[in-house]
Amino acid sequence: MKRILYTTLSILMGMQLTAQDANTGDRKSNEILERLTARTESYKTIEVEFVYKMENTDAGIDEQTEGKLMVMGDKYRLNIAGQTVISDGATLWTYIEDAEEVQINSLEDAEESISPNKLLSSYSEDYRSKYIGEEFLYGTTAYVIDLTPIEGKSYYKVRLIIDKEKDQLLDATIFDKNGSTYSYVIRKFTPNVDVPESTFTFDKSEFPDADVIDMR
């Protein structure tokens, strides 16, 4: 579950979408993803408010929660479902509210890390993209693109909905092999927000009662 959560967020951040060679995606999808990447990387900071949805019809699951993501280059801060995940580009701090603890990991070693650099360098080797078409979604004309993992994953497809006019991600949905879908629907996307560097470093005073567990 957590792995899928972070995989989807990496796509939401826009940093995993980079140019592919001719063997890993069709020309139309490549061009769209290149524009999305260029637009996203042109921003100094990004603030995203989104809704995370988990659905499994057979199991009777239909859940959703709201979240917020701040990004500055390789640094990010995520708040969702009682967790705060902070990275300064080298270290990963995860605060778990229910457990009242903070786990510290090296970003390089963290199995579920969403480091933009790592994802940027591995994308063209890990996925094939396919242009599905245009649809009117979320009040605008949008591109629909499917990403298929080249090697075995717990999911078989990621569907991206991209605003045609703004070159901006609107929705990312992972289709899991167990019949579940995990979606992020972006409610608000604000580029170039004025945010201090301290946002992306752990401050113990924010979580005074939490146990700190260094797992490096």
Image (tube, helix red, strand yellow):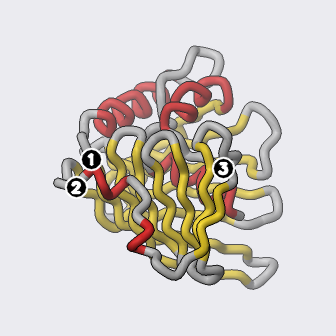
- Name the N-terminal-most of marks 2 and 1: 1
Secondary element type, mark 2: loop
Amino acid marked by disc 3? Glu
Write the residue at 56% across / 79% down: 97
Q: Where 44 falls versus 38 (above or below)?
A: below
Name the residue beneath numbered marker 2.
195
* Marks 3 and 1, how far apart at CA: 22 Å
Residue furthest out toward the top: 22
Any part of residue 63 in sight: no
Quadrant of res 124: top right
Amino acid marked by disc 2? Val
Write the residue at 55% across / 69% down: 95
Q: Where 210 falls versus 27 (above or below)?
A: below
Q: Position of residue 59 (x, y in %)?
A: 80, 80
> In front: 58, or 205?
205
Q: Where 166 falls versus 151 (above or below)?
A: below
Tag of residue 112: 3
- Name the N-terminal-most of marks 3 and 2: 3
